Structures are given as structure tokens and as C-alpha cells.
Amino acid sequence: MTDAWITALHPLNNQYPHQVIHPRTDNFGIALYSKYPLSHIQTHYWPPAELPSIEVTIHKQTNSFSLITTHPLPPISKAYHAARNQQIQAAILAANTQSLPTILIGDMNLTPWEPDYTALLTAKKNLLSNTRIGQGILPTWPTFFLPAAIAIDHCFISPEWETSQMVTGPDIGSDHLPIKVTLKLPNQL
């Protein structure tokens, strides 16, 4: 999220009036636009990279849930690789300590086939699962050469959630395809 993106997304302000926006001049600005009211808004700057991640509670009709969105560094060096894993680990820990149903979503710069993915997502205390399971590979990056695209954008959910559908959206001018995930809370309907 940059200042230019804030301007470009301005037409969405009426439809998504609840916002948390942290622009930056690099690739690590982050924003959340919501139709529904937000509370318990926090911005985390987990070390060592200290990039902004957003944590909120979203209130939709009679249900409330926690949402965490993050975008760690790509693993292009040993230091970035370690920083990526530490940020994902911190986000997973934050998600697993929520008292509400929780969603952790973002460009994780991590494929499901990396040993780090398995280590991070199968840790003893992790309760999250990937919404991609049973939905296909759904590669998201890079859009400029889709035959070699990999799945690095993820949505992880706490056990209360059920995935109805996950798909990739059309090319919207980013180097990533968007992901669209339809979730339900079967025990709260």
C-alpha cells in the first residue's frame, strides 16, 4: 500500500468505510478495507524486519472474528529468509492466541512445498489450517509468467471455520493474482 494506491482505491471508501491503512514507499505497506465495523485494532511490527501487520476484530451482524494480515520479506537472502520465518511465526502465534474464530491472510512469500511451511504450520501449538487444502494448487505469483507461478498467498483459519471455496481472481494489474476465500462458521449460523 502506497500513497498512490490510497488515491486509486478512494472510490471504495463508501463501500468499505472501515479502514486501517499503513502506506510505505516500498512493497510492504499494508491496508485493510472492511464493510463491517472494526475494533481492537492493532498494528504489529514484529522483529527483526518490523514490517507492519494488521490485527483487528471484525463485527459482522451477530458474529465477530479476528483477522490478521501480514506480508513478510521474500526469502532472497539468509537474513530475509530468517526474518520471513520469524514474522510468519509471530503471526501464527498471534492467531493461535485469539479467543474468537480467526483468519490469518497475506502474501507469505512461502510455498506449501517448502520445509519451512511444514515446520511453521505443523508446530504443536498451531491450530491453523490452510484454506487451499482440497481447493487445488491455486498459484498466485508471478502474473507476468503464469506457467511458472507458485502459491505464496495464503489464508489460514482457526478450527471454527469451514472453507466453502477458494479461487484465484483475475489479473488486476498486480504481480500477484488475488485470492478469494468463502468461509462459514457452521456452529454459529
Image: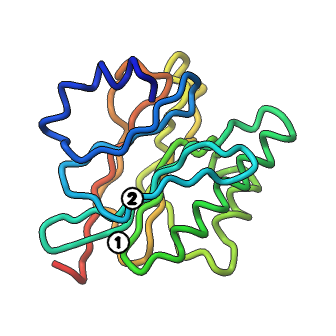
- The coloring applied to the image is rainbow
The residue singled out by tag 2 in the image is: 41
* Residue 179, x across and y down, in percent: 38, 41
* Residue 97, x across and y down, in percent: 53, 77
* Residue 171, x across and y down, in percent: 37, 23
Would you call the spot at circle 2 few (<14 residues within 10 Å), some (14-19), or many (20 or more)? some
Q: Amino acid at mark 1?
A: Trp
Task: State the mark number for residue 28.
Answer: none
Secondary structure category for the residue under label 1: loop
**Front-lying residue, 138 or 156:** 156
The residue singled out by tag 1 in the image is: 161
Q: Disc 1 or 2, which lies upstream in sequence?
A: 2
The quarter in which the C terminus is drawn is bottom left
Q: Amino acid at mark 2?
A: Ile
Q: Is residue 67 left or right of residue 51?
A: left
Position of 175 relative to 154 (above/below) = above
Q: Are marks 1 and 2 in contact (CB under 8 Å)?
A: no
**Front-lying residue, 129 or 36:** 36
The quarter in which the N terminus is drawn is top left
Q: Is residue 132 left or right of residue 86?
A: left
Secondary structure category for the residue under label 2: strand
Q: Is residue 138 left or right of residue 78?
A: left
* Residue 140, x across and y down, in percent: 49, 34
Picture residue at 84% right of the left edge, 34% below the top? 77
Position of 160 relative to 147 (above/below) = below
**Front-lying residue, 163 or 157:** 157
Picture residue at 69% right of the left edge, 63% below the top? 120
Front label number (1 vs 2): 2
CA gap between label 1 and label 2 equals 21 Å
**Front-lying residue, 154 or 4:** 4
User: Disc count in the image?
Assistant: 2
Asked which quadrant contains residue 37, the reply is bottom left
